[in-house]
Amino acid sequence: MLNVELLRPALRAAWGPDTCDPHDLANWRPDNPARGQCGTTALVVQDLLGGELLLGEVHVDGVKIGHHWWNRLPDGTTIDLTADQFHPGETVIGGQIRHRPPDAPRRCRGQYELLRHRVLGTLAGEHPEFAGQGPHGVLSDARPASPAGPPVRIAVVALTDSTGAVLLQLRSRNKAAEPGQWALPGGHVEAGETPAEAAARELLEETGLAAELRPVWRDLRPDLTGSAPAVDLHAFEGMAAETTIVLGEGEAARFVQIAELPGMNLSPTAAAVLHRLLRWA
């Protein structure tokens, strides 16, 4: 039977800056992988094991600095799989049951879906006997048939202005990938294009801006839309000479100071790229 001890290593392996709440992204480190993972983790635990969500407050010297989520299982056992994330002096206070809305989470939706995808894939691969288990048989959809063909190629741009602010675009809510989240400008690499050409084209089409770009990171990532077996991500960075945005796609676009990023609903892809590029204050 699926249990906490089998779920724990699958979650730990799935955590990363792209599943972290942006509020804690600056403090996420490989040696503290649970940092900023409590909300998404509690939801995935509830998906797989059932029970209730608990919400408390994080205090430092008696002052609230944030919230913390954990779980109570159907048998009454309380489990907190991200409890070891806290720094000395950070204390969790309280713990009230919170009902899960049907559309939860409204923030960090992409992070939750990515974490769930990774955990289900690990469990289905290592423990196929659990297929169909869980409160809603959630492991039955852990490994849908992957589309044939190569990974889809995506190019994104981390463009900064002279103050160090980074350009973000609010994705439309009807997008298949990372809808309603703040993302980096970018899109598909078309046939006959190089990733660098695609990055420059997408930047111009989506924001009206042009810049000299250089490649900074490449990663093979899951495609949660089901349209390709994987995403071959090419990330570029550049400095904007002109900052007047002409919005060509999405709901909004603006340059965001680094200090503002913790309050943004960043997409997982943007978080993964920016965590590698930025020097956080």
Image: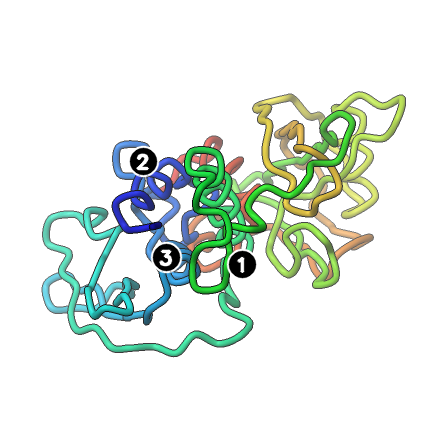
Image point 69% across, 43% down: which residue?
185
Query: Could you tell whether 260 is left or right of 45 in the image?
Result: right
Is 87 or 127 nearer to us in this picture? 127
Image point 25% across, 67% down: which residue?
72
Q: Specify how the rendered protein is coloured.
A: rainbow
Distance, label 2 to label 3, CA atoms, is 22 Å
Image point 60% across, 54% down: which residue?
182
Whether the residues at callouts 2 and 3 have beta carbons within 8 Å, the answer is no
Is 121 or 153 nearer to us in this picture? 121
Query: Could you tell whether 133 is left or right of 26 in the image?
Result: right
Whether the residues at callouts 2 and 1 have beta carbons within 8 Å, the answer is no
Residue flagged by tag 1: what amino acid is it? Arg
Q: Quadrant of the C terminus?
A: top left
Element assignment for label 3: helix
Q: In this rendering, is residue 205 above or below 189?
A: below
Residue 253's tag is none
Element assignment for label 1: helix
Residue flagged by tag 3: what amino acid is it? Val
Residue 29's tag is 2
Which quarter of the picture shows residue 181? Answer: bottom right
Task: Please state the horizontal and vertical placement of residue 263, each as a whole percent of the image.
Answer: 45, 60
Residue flagged by tag 2: what amino acid is it? Arg
Q: In this rendering, is residue 20 above or below 154?
A: below
Image point 85% across, 23% down: which residue?
193
Q: Which residue is mark 3?
A: 45
